[in-house]
Amino acid sequence: MKKLKIKTGDTVRVIAGDNKGQEGKVQKVLIDKNKAIVEGVNLVSKHQKPSASSPQGGIVKQEAAIHISNLSLLSANGEATRVGYRIEGDKKVRFSKKSNEVI
């Protein structure tokens, strides 16, 4: 299993592609595909058939997955940073390489 440096709940900025510059919170990480679903970013239109849960049906907007390489983690002060790991005491923690703060 591959270790990804972006986790669910992190705030990220898109650094490449059509959605470059947009920011959002990670809703889900797809480890096997190296992709993440970010809230409010990379919206696609989906044709939905009428069902019991949505009797109207029609065209709905939903988030599509973005490759992890196109995302950059935002630190507490809102600037993009890379992520590193280090051991503090007996715990392994993530830290911002730009500000050297624990995330």
Image (cartoon, helix red, strand yellow):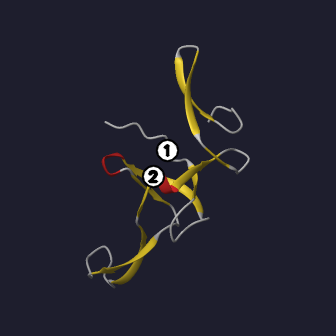
| In this view, 1 is above or below 22 | above
Question: Residue 63's x, y, as percent?
Answer: 43, 67
Mark 2: which amino acid?
Ile
Q: Nearer the viewer, residue 29 or 33?
A: 33
Q: Circles 1 and 2: CB distance less than 8 Å? A: yes
**Mark 1 or mark 2, earlier in chain:** 1
Foreground mark, 1 or 2, reads: 2
User: Mark 1 highlights which residue?
Assistant: 6
Q: Nearer the viewer, residue 101 or 10?
A: 101
Residue displayed at 32% across by 52% down: 33
**SS class of the residue under badge 2?**
helix
* Measured Cα–Cα span from mark 1 to mark 2: 8 Å
Question: Residue 95's x, y, as percent?
Answer: 61, 33
Task: Tell me the crowding category of disc 1: few under 14, some 14 to 19, or many 20 or more residues within 10 angstroms, Cα based.
Answer: many
Q: Quadrant of residue 75?
A: top right
Residue displayed at 51% across by 71% down: 18
**SS class of the residue under badge 1?**
loop
Left or right position of 66 against 73: left
User: Mark 2 highlights which residue?
Assistant: 68
| In this view, 38 is above or below 4 | below
